[in-house]
Image (spheres, rainbow, N blue to C red):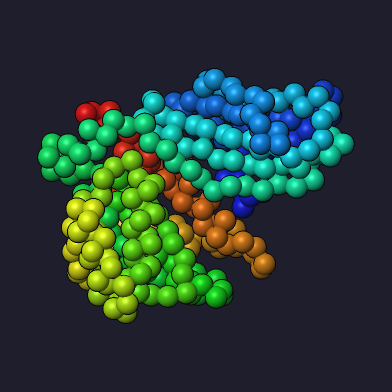
Amino acid sequence: MNHETFDLLRSAYINKSDSKLVVQTQVLSLYFYRFCLYYNGECIVNEPFSRVPTCRFDLKGVDGDYVIEFIYKDQDRIEYSYELSLTIIKGKILQENRVEIIKTVSIDPKLLSVSSSSYEDYPGRSIIIDSFELNSFGINDFKKYIYIAFDDFSKEIFYLCSDYKNYNCVIMMLKEICKLTSYKVAQIVFDDSYSTKGFSKLVKYCKNNEIGISVEKVKENVSYDKAYQYIVDLLEEYLNSYIIVGCNYDKVLVGFVNKYNVIDKNKLIHHETPHTRISSFFNVN
């Protein structure tokens, strides 16, 4: 199994000696792991959380469609899960299909609402959104733009690919961020380089959700520009390593985001990961 298929999964294979399905993930220190196995939609294995990032499932020679749910979390605060669908016939994996990352939140909602009043800087204080042409990364596709957003506090990033460069895409991006984040978005920052389509809808959405709007030249803000340059340089290096002709670049981008947010130490935030920085903040509360 390659990087494009499943970023945190090192291998999934049938052990010939005992016919067990072995699932191995990358070891993330200080994390708790849990594996669930579904057969034809029914959960047949539900492992408790442990420190062991490897699981062996006893399939008992039964062919069919399986789904592995891999969950990991840090100190009961933020929880991530992946699903990997497998078709197994005669002890062989014939087909694999990865479902994108799902993040659920176990942080007390009260902490989300009080974070802004308790600290000068906090997760969600400013979400910066900017767009880039995909062909600038060597990707020729009908989706011409990649929107990259980051949380100014944690440097956690998000992305969206689209044919268009307008405020409707900014709304889509913002809705996805609000769904995924473990913190309340207080303000979004973007520039005025988009076509005006969707701007009134964006203003209405932000007003209804108590999100502030700041329109400014993102690239002229030294702090924002430094962060973007760092992110874009990493993304370009990553794409050069993993983009090949005919591959699903969207899955590769998911892999980059997961790796950046969860695994790699970030020099912009004292060599923490964005995930660790967010967790540490709420642990202080």
What x and y, as percent, mark residue 218? 25, 67
Quadrant in which the C terminus appears: top left
- Residue at horizontal 51 percent and vertical 53 percent from the top: 254
Task: Locate residue 74: give its quadrant.
Answer: top left
Q: Find the residue positioned furthest to the right.
A: 90
Position of residue 17 relative to residue 68, above or below, is: above
- Residue at horizontal 31 percent and vertical 38 percent from the top: 278
What x and y, as percent, mark residue 243? 60, 62
Position of residue 280 relative to residue 228, above or below, is: above
Position of residue 112 relative to residue 198, above or below, is: above
Quadrant in which the N terminus appears: top right
Q: Does residue 272 appear anywhere in the picture? A: no
Report whether 202 appears left or right of 156: left
Report whether 74 appears left or right of 142: left
Near-viewer residue (38 or 162): 38
Report whether 179 appears left or right of 18: left
Report whether 188 appears left or right of 239: left
What x and y, as percent, mark residue 12? 70, 37
Q: Does residue 129 appear anywhere in the picture? A: yes
Task: Locate residue 169: give its quadrant.
Answer: bottom left
Near-viewer residue (17 or 186): 186
